[in-house]
Image: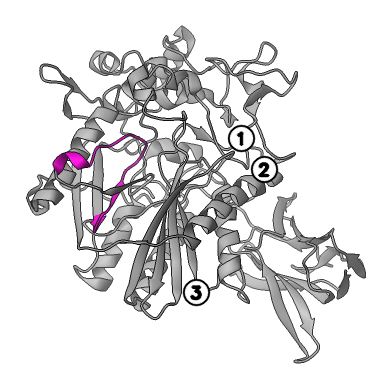
Amino acid sequence: MVQGENEWVMQQLKNRYGDLYGPDNVVLSGTHTHSGPGGYFQYTIYMISSRGFIKPSFNAIVNGILESIATAHENMVKGRVFINKGLVENTQINRSPLSYLNNPESERLRYTSNTDKEMVLLKMVADNGQEIGMLSWFAIHPVSMNNTNLHTSSDNIGYAAYLFEEEKNKGYLTGKGPYVAGFASSNLGDVSPNIQGPHCINTGDSCENLNNYCPIGGTKMCIAKGPGKDMLESTQIIGRNIYLKAKELYSTAFEEINGPIHSAHQWVDMSNITVQLNATHTGKTCKPALGYSFAAGTMDGPGMFNFTQGMIEGNSFWDAVRDAVLTRPSKETEECHKPKPILIPTGELSKPYPWHPNIIDIQIITVGSLAILALPGEFSYEFESHGKTEMNVVLSGLCNIYTHYIATYEEYQIQRYEGASTLFGPHTLSAYIQLYRGLAKAIAEGTARDLPNLPEPPILNVTDLTFLPIIRDAKPLDRNYGDVLQDVQPKYRMVGTLLLLYKTFVTNFTFLTVEKYDNTSNHWKVMYNDASWDTRFTWQKDIWGRSTSIVQWHISNNTEPGTYRIQYFGHSKELLRPIRSFSGSSLQFEVSG
């Protein structure tokens, strides 16, 4: 969840429910994927990467959040919450192990691994015994689907949720059942699912070095993969591992969460926090800025040009480009961020809109012995220091606002991708720890309402900044939208792949169904839709406004034999004509065992 969306959702909640819901008791947390639509963030740095502010994407996400909250509100019942924890093995690696090794040995000795393997799971059950849903937190980046993927995908975490909900919502289409399985993000900053590690894709040699650099081809050749033979299989393997651990924890969740609900929320200026480092020394946070190694990317998705991870010195050419195109960072900002060489001084750029937020909201919600820290990154936290003993502390990342990464002070010195993407300088983590301790103390002492607060940042109301080309649809005179160009074969055996090509356009909302004929009712029954793992929808742009849609159904070995058809539903938007809906259908075909 990001600023802009967050404020808009809160505004709409106030209009609908008055003071019942607001920033104090609502946490908006992204379950996270790197294969989703962009263009919904109001800050310039993100608009550049997504070709502007895309209002349909923004509206779809905001309306979906509001609909979800309304559905939960209208179906609220009394129930019980149970908690369980366990380790997930063979599922993640640290993608910056050399940075991790720069942490003090005394700190590293507290842990058995250089990643957090613990999954925390909450099980929700109504008083009448009906299972309502589950929510879990686990540290992993959803990048099993790499940056060559062009399909919208919820990645490994989404596949885990898909498997859990398929099991609990028997007889329902994907995403349509009453049971909800949520797999949320935690301290995932340096955690990768590509457990085979980084290798040079042209030679096969390991490139696990400070710069993730290959002798031939540089950083672009250094990519991590695995554990599957391709990214789809890797997504399934990692997602299934997460699902199986969640299923195990869910079935053995007997510790009940009891007690009152409290919350503390605060708006703070993260660019101007004085940090008490020890009894005699203080530090300060900085205006936001991105370092050179930000542009290098990671082993999960390399960047561009000649940037590498671990850069602690700038480059005269790129400095000149930055100064000419953007602005030269001030001496104060350069000094504050050392040893980070600044590539983009986002805190000193304001046109056409601010490039990064300064005003950040921080939040803790407690339910009995459960404390959920809503935060934008990863760090360790001591909750017991203010009277709350035996607390179950959950680090819930990507909440309310996105502020890139939060590396430790020692990891920051190495300036790999995570350090270069730590926006507010080397003391960012210490500042967050100090601030969240303040929230924890306020909850423990019952003084949350007395916390000082800055005014919340304004909604920028970006409405017309888009770099997407205007697209109009067209078709040959002898064709209709939805015409099938390549139809199905008469018969298929499990396992196989069915492929259809439809003549179509740019779809605003695309739906496909795989339907089975029911001989008893003499009606077609929808068995799969576009949210099903076994279906694929691909839109390909042609010339002169024409385009082709490809619908695929990968027939699994547990498919019910029978007579099937595939339908596709879309919309066309021709020049000087209103948007019109259309549909296309395949011939009937048989699936046998």
Q: Which residue is mark 3?
A: 178
Q: Which mark is residue 385?
A: none
In the rendered structure, does residue 518 fall within the stretch colored magenta?
no
Disc 2 marks a residue whose amino acid type is: Ser
- Crowding at mark 1 (Cα within 10 Å: few <14, some 14-19, many 20+): many
Secondary structure category for the residue under label 2? helix
Q: Which residue is mark 1?
A: 194
Q: Position of residue 94 (x, y in %)?
A: 51, 29
- Crowding at mark 3 (Cα within 10 Å: few <14, some 14-19, many 20+): few
Q: Which residue is mark 2?
A: 234
Disc 1 marks a residue whose amino acid type is: Asn
**In the picture provided, is 388 more to the left or to the right than 29?**
left
Circles 2 and 1, Cβ within 8 Å, touching? The answer is yes
Circles 3 and 2, Cβ within 8 Å, touching? The answer is no
**In front of the other: 39 or 555:** 555
Q: Position of residue 118 (x, y in %)?
A: 44, 43
Q: Compare marks 1 and 3 and give the one earlier in the sequence.
A: 3
Disc 3 marks a residue whose amino acid type is: Pro
What separation in Å lies between label 1 and label 3 (alpha carbons)?
33 Å
In the rendered structure, does residue 377 fall within the stretch colored magenta?
yes
**In the picture provided, is 291 more to the left or to the right than 428?**
right
**In front of the other: 259 or 410:** 259
Q: Total number of numbered labels?
A: 3
Residue 209 seen in the current view: yes
Q: Which residues are magenta?
A: 366-386
**In the picture provided, is 299 more to the left or to the right than 148?**
left
Q: Compare marks 3 and 2 and give the one earlier in the sequence.
A: 3
